[in-house]
Amino acid sequence: MSPIQGIVVAGLRKRYGATLALDGMSFTVRPGVVTGFVGPNGAGKSTTMRVILGLDAVDEGIALIGGRRYRGLRHPLKHVGSLLDAAAPHPGRSGRNHLLWLAHSQGLAARRVDRVIEQVGLGPAARRGAGGYSLGMRQRLGIAAALLGDPPIIMLDEPFNGMDPDGIIWMRGLLRSLAADGRAVLVSSHLMSEVQDTADHLVVAGRGRAIADAGVADLIAACSGGRVVLRTTAGADATRVLARAGATVAATGRDTVTVSGMPADRIVALLGAGAVPFSEVSAHRATLEDVYLELTREAVEFRAATPTEVTR
């Protein structure tokens, strides 16, 4: 493999008729890191992954796997393993035979097929027709295919779909272990909680470009913004005392307010001096879902009305 490990996406532009699907999409997926790839529907995630795998051509830009285009790879499964469509296997073919067919096309031995079947926990169902597989089982079969060539790069689109709780826990561990082995792992998902629990780095797509490309912890810290959550039964008094001292205070619940622009110890001192009762002062920690909603606020193509708007 080329000395350039991982995936490099640079300046991808792709138009389907009047629709601009990619508008300068650029990012890098590094070895040893799970990179989450998120964004609203129509943001360009699936198109980008298809371009990386040589399934779609672009009008401008380049996508490289280990420093080379996908179409220039001999035995590509030994370079990159991917799961884009869990419904792809022929329904009349057993899971094992599907993998044997792939292995033969890549010059891989049958023992490798049995190894990945064991790795994804599909052993009891491996000789059954794939047409009878549940979505979770088809996901496992697709992941087995992605791992077949023992590649240094893994790309998975919505791998948590159809997984039961045990499967989700297994998937988290698998992704972390692949990165721990030094592989570059790109995971597209709409499940922010799973991305937060799994990914080290995040690329947020919006309107065909990367609108954020940073570490998950850094994005959460930036979104948290140094805010402090205050729980008090005297919200009006607390707001008056803190606002007078220069803080920005916003009610977020019946007994909670969020304070910006003031550290927690100063808040405690002011409330104590003003004899304002409170039960909790804690640093606000945003979730990855908060980060996602903030970053994609202007990039969502379709937005439903809120329940209160519907009932008015």
Image (cartoon, rainbow, N blue to C red):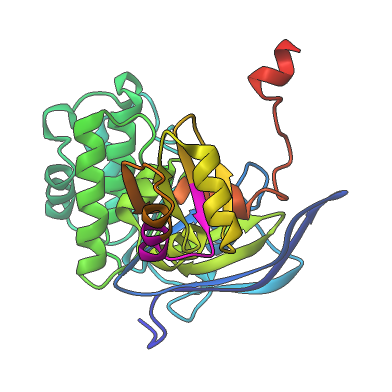
Q: Is residue 90 visible?
A: yes
Residue at 25% of width from left, 48% of height from top? 172
What range is drawn magenta here?
258-269
Q: Nearer the viewer, residue 24 or 72?
A: 24
**Percent coordinates x, y for residue 32 in the rendering:** 29, 72
**Percent coordinates x, y for residue 149 in the rendering:** 27, 61
Image quarter (top left, top right, bottom left or bottom right) of the N terminus = bottom left
- Quadrant position of residue 100: top left
Q: Nearer the viewer, residue 195 or 307?
A: 307
Q: Is residue 286 visible?
A: no
259 falls in the magenta region = yes
Q: Residue furthest bottom?
A: 3
Q: Residue furthest right?
A: 18
Residue at 47% of width from left, 81% of height from top? 67
Say left or right for 71 vs 82. Answer: right
- Quadrant position of residue 187: bottom left
Image quarter (top left, top right, bottom left or bottom right) of the C terminus = top right
**Percent coordinates x, y for residue 25 in the rendering:** 65, 66
**Percent coordinates x, y for residue 311 in the rendering:** 71, 11
Q: Nearer the viewer, residue 37 or 231?
A: 231
- Quadrant position of residue 138: top left
Please state the total of marks drawn on the protein image: 0
Say left or right for 236 vs 307. Answer: left
266 falls in the magenta region = yes
Q: Is residue 127 above or below residue 273?
A: above
Residue at 55% of width from left, 47% of height from top? 239
Residue at 44% of width from left, 36% of height from top? 88
